[in-house]
Amino acid sequence: MADERTVGEAHSAPTGAAAPAVVHRSRWPGWIWLVPIAAAAILIWFGARFLFTHGETVTVIFEQAAGVSAQNTKVEYRGVQVGEVKDVTLSDDGMHVRVRLSMDRSADRYLRSGTRFWLQSATGDLSDLSSLMSLLGGPSIEMEPGAGQPQRQFVALAHAPAFKTPTAGTRFTLTASSQGSAQRGSSVYYLGLDVGKVTDVQLVGPHAFRYEVLVRSPYDRLVHASSRFYDAGALELSMSSGLKLQLLSPLALLQGAVAFETPDSASHAPPSPTGSVFTLYGDKHSAELAPQGPQAYFAVNFPDPVGGLSSGAAVKLLGFVVGHVQDVGLQFDPASGQLRTPVTIAIDTDRLRFSTDGAGNRSAGAATLTQAAAVARLQRAIAQLVRNGLRARLAQEPPLIGADFVSLDLVPHAPPAHLDLRQPLPVLPATNGGGLKGFTAQLGALPLQQIGTNVRSITDRIRGFVNSPQLTQSLTHLQDTLTGIDQMVRQVKPQIPMLITSLRRAADQLEGVADAAHQALGGAEEQGGMNEAMAEVTRTARSVRELADYLQRHPEALLRGKQP
C-alpha cells in the first residue's frame, strides 16, 4: 500500500535525513461550531417553552386604552402576571379599541364567560396600592375570572370595580337630589369603620341620583329600616354647641364617603334585605333632622323677613329638634297690595312624647297608632300649647352669625290665640324673633338721639368743670393741705418713740401707786370705796400700757386714728 510504503521508507531513511509529514484527520469538526450549536439549542428551548407555557390569544374591547402598548402592558390577576398585550388596534367603527392579549397557559382555565377585564389606569386610587404603582409603571390590565363557558372575546368594564374579588355582603340603593362627594369606589363607614363601597353612581332624573352600595358581611346586619345614610366626605362645621370642626378621615375628604347610623332602638329589628332603598342625606345634621314617623304640617306667617330661612332648617321646641322647615314661600296679595312670606313646617309625631297621668306613664307611641291618629293627637297637643302661649319665631344659633331656624317657645303674657284645627293647614301664631332683623329692631327702639344729647351734655359739663378756676383753686388748697400734713408727720414721727416710753413709764407708776396703797390699807373693810379706786387705777395703768403697745405697732394712728 502507498501509505504503508511511505511509513516504511520513513523508518528506513538514513540518519540525519528529514522525516516526511504525517497527516491525521480527526472526526471533531472544531470549536468554532459551538456558537451555532448553542444558538440552535436556545431557539429550541424558547420554542419548547413557548409551546408549553403560551396559552390562548384573546381579544378584549375597551372604550379607551390610554397608555396601553404591545409588549409593555401586562395582564395581571391577584398581582401575578398572567399575560401581556400582543397588539392594539382600533375597531372597525373607530369607536372602540381592540386589544389582543397573549395569555399564559396557566390562565386558560379562567377565560370563560363572566370573566371581567378592566384597565387599571394611571389616575391612582389612594385606597388601592396597585393603582398607585401604576403611576410609576404605567397602566395594567386586570382580570377577574368568571364561571361560564370558554370564551375568547370579551368586553372590558368601563371602570374598575369597587371590589376586585367576590365579596359577601348586601347591596342597597341610595337616592339623592344632588351628587355629593361620594363617587364610584368611595368607602361606606359605620361609626368610623370602613364596612363597604359605593359600586355605582347614576343620574336617573333631572334632580335624582342613584347610588348602589355594597355593605360587607357581617356589617350588613347593622342596616335596618330606620338607618340613616348621609354624605360624610366633606368637612363638617358645627356651631350649635360651640365651634366644632369634624372630619371622618383624610381619605374620605379626597375620595368622598358615605356613612350610616342606626338607632339603638332598631337593633332588635330584622336587617334590611338586598335592594332596600334609603335616602342619602347631604350631611349628618340633615340625617338627624329627618322625620322618624308621621308628620303634622303647620303654616306660620312671620312678621320678620324670612329670606335667610331655607327648606330643611330645624324646628325646635324649647331647644329640642322636633321637625324641619318644609317650604318657604313668597306671595303677593293683590287685594291688599302686600307681600307675605308663608312658611310651612313639619313636626315629627315621634319627637314629642305623651304621658297619661301625673306619674309620668307614657301613652303609646306614634308607631303604634295609625298615621291619622298620630297626627291628630299632635295637633291637639300643639293647640293646647298655643293657648298656653306657644309662639313661633325666627332664631339664629349662634346669634347674628348662625343659620336661621324656627323656634317654638312659650312666651309669657302673650296675647290670646288659638289654633284652628279645621283648616287643612293650621296656622301657628308667630311673634317677633331674633336674628339680625330682631337685633336691628331692638337697636332701632333705643332712644339713640336722646342718649347722644345726654352724652354731649355730660361731656360739656365735664369740660367746663375741668377748665373752671374753682377746680384750679381747690387743687391748690389740696396741695397746701397735703404739704402741711407731711410737715406735721415729719415733726411728730421722731416724738413717737418718746411718747411710747412715757406712756409705759406712766403705766408702771400707776401700777406702783396701786400696789403701795393696797399694802398700806391692808385690805380692811373700813376702807370704804378705796379698793374700788385702786382697782380703777390698775385698769387705767393697763389701758395706758395697751395704748403704748398699739402705738408702737401702728404709729400712723396718731394721724388717722384707730382703724376698725
Image (tube, rainbow, N blue to C red):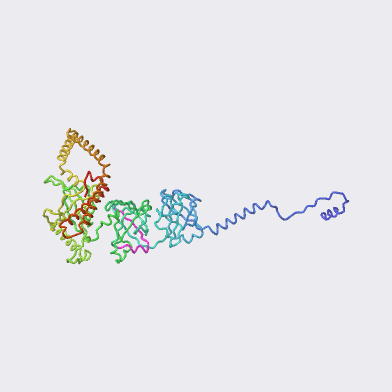
**80, above or below 560, in the image:** below
Q: Position of residue 523 (x, y in %)?
A: 20, 59
Q: Which residues are magenta?
A: 207-224
> Magenta segment: does it hold 211?
yes
**Residue 142, percent across and down?**
45, 55
Q: Is residue 275 left or right of residue 488?
A: right
Q: Is residue 229 in view?
A: yes
How many numbered discs sit on the rendered protein?
0
In front here: 449 or 173?
449
Where residue 259 appears, as percent x and y from the top left, is 33, 57
Camera-nearest residue between 361 and 452: 452
Residue 289: x and y in percent read 25, 56
Instruction: Please state which of residues 274 and 427 is positioned toward the viewer in this rendering.
Output: 427
Question: Which quadrant of the rendered structure holds the N terminus?
Answer: bottom right
Q: Is residue 397 visible?
A: no
Q: Is residue 191 magenta?
A: no
